[in-house]
Amino acid sequence: MTAYHRPRTLEQALALRAATGALPLAGGTDIHPLRTARAAWGETWREAILDLSAIPGLDGIAETAEGWRIGARTTWTAIAEAPLPPLFDGLRAAAREVGGRQVQNRGTIAGNLVTASPAGDGIPNLLALDARVELASSLGTRSLPVAAFVTGYRSTALAPGEIVTALHIPRCDGAHGRFVKLGARRYLVISIAMAAAVIRSEGGRIVAARIAMGACSPVAQRLPALEAALHGVALEDAARVPDPAHLVPLAPIADIRASADYRRDAALALLRDLLAGFAA
Amino acid sequence: MIALIVNGTRHDVAADPFAPLSDTLREGLGLTGTKEGCNAGDCGACTVLMDGAQVCACLVSTAQADGAAITTVEATDPLLEALRAAFLAHGAAQCGICTPGMLMAALDLLRRDAAPDRVAVEDALGGVLCRCTGYLQIIDAVLEAARGVATPAPGTGAVGAAIPRLDGAAKVAGTERYGADGAPADSLWLRIVRSPHASARFTLGDLDAARAAHGLVAILCARDVPGVNAFGIMPNLKDQPVFADGLVRHRGEAVLGLLGTRDAIAAVRDADLPITWDPLSPLIGIDAALAPDAPQLHAHAPGNVLVRGHLKRGDAEGALASSAACAEGRFATAFVEHAYIEPEAGHAAAGGLTIAACTQAPVMDQEETARVLGVAQDSVRIIPTGCGGGFGGKLDVSVQPLLAVAARVTNRPVRMTYSRTESMAASTKRHPARLQARMGADADGRFTAFTLEGDFDTGSYASWGATVANRVPVHACGPYRVPNVLARTRAVHTNAPPSGAFRGFGVPQAAIATEALVDDLAEALRLDRWAIRRRNAIGRGDTTPSGQVLHASAGLPECLDALKPEWDAALARVAAHNATQPRERLGAGIACMWYGCGNTAMSNPSTMRITLARDGTLTLFNGAVDIGQGSTTVIGQIAAEALGLPLAALRQVVGDTALTPDAGKTSASRQTFVSGRAAAEAAKALRARLLALANAGDGAALSLDGTRLTVRDAHTTRVIDLAALDADITAEARYDPPTVPLDADGQGVPYATYGFAAQVAIVRVDTVLAKVKVEEIIVAQDVGRAVNPLLIAGQIHGGVAQGLGLALMEEFIPGRTENLHDYLIPTAGDMPRIRIHLIEDPEPEGPFGAKGVGEPALVPTAPAILSAIRHATGVRITQVPVLPHRLHAALRA
């Protein structure tokens, strides 16, 4: 039987994590399927589990002086239903597109990030929100930008002994978020591609744009050239700005869900749709 | 100990904290109403409420449920009761395996939102997959439960009445027992070790040492099979081993069986077992298998061709050469997975002679299992459990011989449940087809000729490959008058999982090619697509390419006539929309189909027995297993009507080989037609005996009250005290649909009757993202006689859903899409609106004029969708599924 720890305090959790290296588990929506996938071909589960679900204070959304703190264990449903400003509209839209309602009720924002799937619907949104990851260990806490935290295909900067405790979203007054997702069916679908944006405008013109694309590279990517090109552009003209040169940070692959060519063209189309939505 | 508060009752359980809650509910608490379909959060069958919110119980560690309030389908709750009633009334439960999850998801919704709209219902149910219903009746049921107005149940069970299914109460209560439910508590667990290679030789080391090292009761392999280590569908070709013997021919083939406690078999790593693999280069795809230097996979299949099908009528080549218009195309389809939500499961009693498992074919299971055990067929008893979806995939044996061998060798009860990946890797698939077809027409648009060269990837073992190869030529030219036809098919062995039976047996694939050519001819001749089909539609008195004259029940012209106003309206709507919308284009498409009910030119009898006992019980011994399509209800309605007693008086014993006569398999859309007719004949025979007892005339009315049978005719009323009779009164009847074997050119009478249908599809295509949304499907289907319109609607909705999946998203790739998140089937949000026109052109052979419904509903959907995509975009689709990237490439070609 797998060692299964379910500590009641963060201190206990950090001590266990340091001592055992146990794998943190929150909503379980990635780890239980992984166990099933391994078992199907006769591979048994060996890793010890560190269940974070009994630790108080790891969930919930709080407004701070600098912005918002989203507890690591905050579920998609909690995000979708929270009274958040339009800055979060993209993240909230993603919260309604992850899996089905059951997964939204259990899956967590930090779990999505730590799994670091190229198709994780939360990650482009966190990039567009300029989020930072709060990490705790028994030695203390540190924080990293999301772009620095996700280091590659299903890999992160989470150090041995560390646990993600929260995401911090800086204030961006007047900004709006949007998210669009492309999949081959309506629900329960892994993204072929998705795009997230946070845009602040003044007098109908874009003064700040942060745009990220998911499922088109091993790690979701910001698109700095596009962001720069959008500066000063009227909202109603924004959808005309994206062009193929802006997709340079992406490296779309062919897989069972789509061809690379399609992903590249769809990425551009999604960006245009995404930006068109800000003018609506 | 973990404290679970389930439906208000506290249970302290000593469960593994990491064990999924679904497992603890089922195995720890015996609450088997919660179903496990994937253990990965992909199907939602295990949905329960946790502190009021719907969750997949398979994704919750049991430890996480400590102290939480868990609500399962077994709960007592007025809102749940309302949902159950609405599900029953709307036909929302077919096989019922998704029903507990659907009910829980709906309960979660209605507690949050007392008056949801349709989109809110779809959002709430979007995480639960259903493979039977096409979701629409489920959504309607939830909306009705929210409104709080119960649909009044139709009062009678007469033929023609849209009554709820007779076996529905257990499905909505969560008490139906499926293959994984109800094994004896002292059962050993069996886990199969399967090949990770598509083609390999292997040798086994010291299994006894491995057994001891892992604390197992036994490790089974080929040499443990007491009888013949082979099974198969064809009477003369048993080519599939129970356990591979030194050679595997597909990924997922069984190599070893691990028997022991559940924990012991789960703890074994396959890599630690003494199997030495020597992987071989696999034959992937038809071209590889037909290459001159390809290794031959079976002695029975020179050149890897399992079987050829052939039909020739007239001179197709000559007629094509002189036709005013000629169309030609090459088409390709993918492996399609049945994706029933219940993985194969069952249990065997000690000794292995009694097997309870989910199945579509209990008597075939009995025959196969007996051969594997080396015992007489009648010494094996097959007890079908509830069947959580089949669609052809549970016609072949799966767990049955494995369980039998294990229970025989150990003389212990044994149970097993396939994992989802195991089910997908090891079970049969729809044949991928490669079709090259030509079709000609004269200047008036009358079809002159059709040719087909069709190759079907039949995978590693024969299964139903011959059936597909023989059924396709008969149907290939579509339901049209075509005087000259040449159709040749081959079933080709490869190192893929065996392709077998799947709703339509190759006809859905062929229809994709044929209907595209019909559209081509319409375009070439500037004819409307409806008009060219109506002009050529086969009807009563016409001769089929097999030389069969359709004497009756050939209602395709009526189907098309019913669709004409719909078609005109659809074209007008599309034209109006597209005039102003360059990106989101609408398209309308149309397709027709025909489908022979029952086996192709082979005997396929059904026997039914009905008994009026001295204690007043009236019992139909019905060997037709109901896999969710509703045969128990329909055959019951037929029997009661033929007998002249109310359906409520009839009880049924279904499917147990020890108790029921052989009704044949639940396949080929044959149970309503063949077993329904047998039931009607048995009931009529019983009626005749009862009337004779009372010396009453044919028109006498029967009524039953306890043991008092009253027979009333115009002149007299007689009361028979059944308790005073010497014996129960039993009548049995056998019906075998009349067919004539096909000659070398495919000429004969392959089927006693055919179903006919036409469908119109309206799609919306985002031409930039190349995404297709099917907005509406309008169905006209000739069912002979609609015995139960509610269940027929359910079959049509479900067929449309599977046809939509075939057209747009379903592609099984061994090793790549062996789960339900990479293999996509439609969700509640992917379904179109469906409207149905039932045409009743009675079949004289059928019970009360009825014929088969289930497969015909699927066949026209994909070609109608493809026709609509072409209308919207101009792209002629030649490969399915039309995934966005494929349409994107075609749009830019």
Image (cartoon, coloured by chain):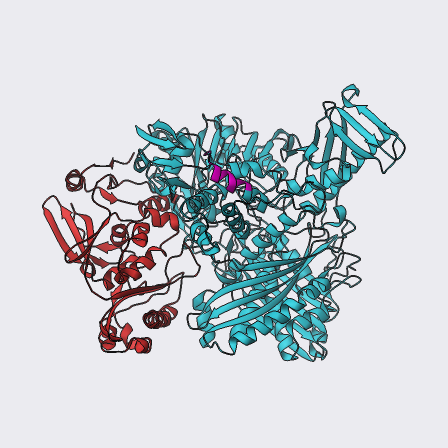
Span of residues in magenta: B75-85
Main secondary structure along the magenta-highlighted residues: helix
Residue B449 position, x and y percent, is 70, 71
Residue B663 position, x and y percent, is 68, 39
**Can you say whether A165 is above or below B433 in the image?**
above
Check the image and name the residue furthest to the right. B715
Q: Quadrant of residue B185?
A: top left
Q: Quadrant of residue B313?
A: bottom right
Let me know if residue B78 is in the magenta part: yes
Q: Nearer the viewer, residue A174 or B97?
A: A174
Residue B446 position, x and y percent, is 72, 74
Q: Nearer the viewer, residue B211 or B729?
A: B729
Relative side of B712 to B794, left or right: right
Residue B54 position, x and y percent, is 39, 44
Q: What colour denotes chain A?
A: red
**Can you say whether A33 is above or below A213 in the image?**
above
Q: Nearer the viewer, residue B509 or B306?
A: B509
**Quarter of the image with the N terminus of chain B in it:** top left
Let me know if residue B620 is in the magenta part: no
Q: Which residue is at 59% across, 67% downward?
A: B513
Residue B666 can be seen in this image: yes
Q: Nearer the viewer, residue B307 or B820?
A: B820
Relative side of B399 to B850, left or right: left
Chain identifier of the cyan chain: B
